[in-house]
């Protein structure tokens, strides 16, 4: 597998991943813009409308028939939040030309795939300078249902609520699918006007993965009428990495001292306790009530290590703390103390945060907090073995190797690298993980502060 990237126009990049591991080609077009309250719902609605029809294939049924004719190709689109960026993703997976029967002068499968995905995005069905009214109204209803169903999955709801509280008033605190109250104001005309602005000003990354000839791919992409029509642009996508997102270290990672000492502010559906310490560092404790049978505890941690390549020791620290079944949290909170049905931690490197997520019995909240804080303190004091360190490294190495085995995971990895302002190859990533020492872990642990504690209960 080899990866190359080039800027084909200002603000538009072509990324090629040449590999013979798969029988399919995977194409992805990723459009990136800064997170904004004014545009976040528009961004969610837009791909849902675009996939409904193009100038030449004016219904979703016709698009699906075209995909079926392309040996069962598949198309999908969606929305993601990567650091302070909102990302619209379009994917088309098709059979590699090596496995397609030759039929005279017919278009290659690769060319058909490139033409179709670019047509869906850049040559949509438009009527009188607006999107088709029927499609917009239908998708507005679908997006409203999607947004309102957020509450159905209590685990992801609790995580997103914790993030909202941690980043209140900041772009990263926005809900990635937007807000239902914004949908009413969106019309077929206003959505189209926004789309025209978006496609001329946003960062665009085009990925092609498979057993490909790079020169052929390049010629097909830059020769596409849809790409020829696009102008270069100075985009405003944000770069987020451990250096841009370093947090101020005030507590030195200590979590075993009481922090909730004063103040209580009651919201309509939640209460907030703001704690202060001698260092004037606030820890927010949010309690939200809902009809739930199991409490959902989320702790948002700030990582204050902001040196270059800090993400590697932070990743290892996170595995030792809570990402795997051999971690401190899993073994001590779930297995030994039986305080949690589920518990794990995950590292969001774009924002230098670690989230501890747990499902617990509601009356065990205080005890669960106590044991979790003990684990944070134990790692800070170096109470982990060399075997735990090596096991964590092997866990990450295995995860990286699994990324290489999936085309969509590879593309996700590389767009993450693109938006972090650098490129670490898979081989380099593994080597840097192997080089992490116990002292590195101690430095990470010493930089950890609890930012927010969120508890969803009945």
Image: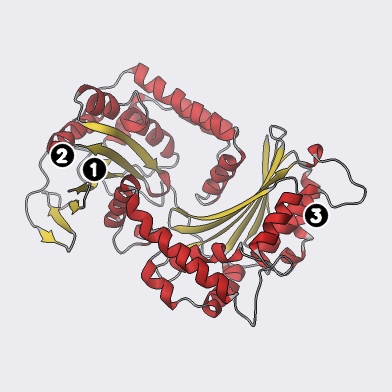
Q: Residue tagged by mark 1?
A: 297
Q: Nearer the viewer, mark 2 or mark 3?
A: 2
Asked whether the residues under the numbered discs 2 and 3 touch, taking CB atoms below 8 Å apart as contact, a structural biologist would say no
Q: Nearer the viewer, mark 3 or mark 1?
A: 1
Report the residue at 22% width, 42% height from top: 293
Can you say whether 103 is above or below 230 in the image?
above
Whether residue 323 appears in this view of the structure is yes
Asked whether the residues under the numbered discs 2 and 1 touch, taking CB atoms below 8 Å apart as contact, a structural biologist would say yes
At numbered mark 2, what does the secondary structure look like: helix, strand or loop?
Answer: helix
Q: Considering only order in the chain, which callout, 3 or 2, is on the residue closer to the N terminus?
A: 3
Q: Quadrant of the N terminus?
A: top right
Mark 3 crowdedness (10 Å alpha carbons): few <14, some 14-19, many ≥20:
few
Report the residue at 32% width, 26% height from top: 327
Whether residue 256 appears in this view of the structure is no
Q: Considering only order in the chain, which callout, 1 or 2, is on the residue closer to the N terminus?
A: 1
Can you say whether 18 is above or below 118 in the image?
above
Q: Is residue 306 left or right of residue 296?
A: right
At numbered mark 3, what does the secondary structure look like: helix, strand or loop?
Answer: helix
**Disc number at residue 365?**
2
Q: Residue tagged by mark 3?
A: 219
């Amino acid at each position: 597998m080899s990866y190359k990237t080039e800027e084909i126009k200002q603000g538009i990049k072509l990324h090629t991943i040449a590999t013979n591991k798969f029988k399919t080609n995977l194409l992805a077009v990723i459009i990136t813009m800064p997170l904004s309250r004014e545009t976040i719902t528009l961004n969610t609605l837009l791909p849902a409308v675009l996939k409904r029809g193009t100038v030449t294939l004016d219904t979703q049924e016709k698009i699906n028939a075209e995909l079926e004719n392309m040996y069962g190709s598949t198309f999908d689109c969606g929305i993601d939040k990567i650091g302070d960026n909102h990302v619209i993703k379009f994917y088309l997976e098709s059979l590699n030309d090596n496995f397609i029967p030759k039929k005279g002068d017919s278009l290659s499968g690769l060319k058909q795939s490139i033409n179709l995905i670019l047509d869906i995005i850049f040559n949509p069905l438009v009527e009188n300078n607006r999107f088709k009214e029927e499609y917009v109204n239908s998708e507005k209803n679908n997006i409203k249902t999607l947004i309102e169903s957020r509450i159905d999955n209590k685990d992801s709801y609790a995580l997103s609520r914790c993030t909202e509280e941690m980043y209140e008033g900041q772009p990263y605190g926005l809900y990635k699918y937007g807000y239902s109250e914004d949908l009413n104001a969106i019309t077929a005309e206003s959505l189209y006007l926004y789309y025209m602005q978006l496609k001329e000003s946003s960062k665009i990354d085009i990925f092609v993965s498979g057993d490909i000839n790079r020169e052929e791919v390049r010629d097909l992409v830059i020769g596409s009428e849809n790409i020829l029509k696009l102008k270069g642009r100075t985009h405003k996508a944000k770069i987020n990495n451990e250096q841009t997102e370093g947090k101020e270290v005030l507590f030195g990672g200590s979590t075993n001292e009481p922090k909730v000492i004063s103040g209580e502010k009651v919201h309509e559906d939640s209460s907030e306790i703001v704690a202060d310490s001698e260092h004037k560092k606030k820890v927010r404790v949010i309690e939200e009530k809902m009809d739930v049978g199991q409490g959902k505890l989320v702790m948002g941690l700030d990582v204050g290590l902001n040196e270059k390549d800090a993400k590697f020791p932070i990743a290892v620290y996170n595995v030792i703390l809570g990402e795997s079944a051999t971690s401190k949290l899993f073994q001590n909170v779930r297995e030994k103390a039986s305080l949690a049905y589920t518990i794990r931690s995950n590292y969001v490197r774009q924002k230098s945060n670690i989230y501890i997520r747990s499902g617990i019995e509601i009356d065990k909240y205080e005890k669960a907090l106590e044991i979790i804080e003990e684990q944070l303190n134990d790692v800070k004091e170096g109470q982990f073995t060399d075997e735990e360190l090596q096991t964590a490294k092997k866990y990450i190495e295995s995860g990286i190797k699994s990324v290489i085995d999936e085309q969509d995971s590879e593309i996700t990895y590389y767009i993450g690298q693109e938006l972090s302002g650098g490129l670490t190859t898979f081989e380099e990533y593994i080597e840097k993980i192997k080089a992490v020492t116990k002292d590195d872990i101690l430095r990470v642990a010493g930089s950890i502060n609890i930012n927010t504690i969120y508890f969803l209960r009945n």
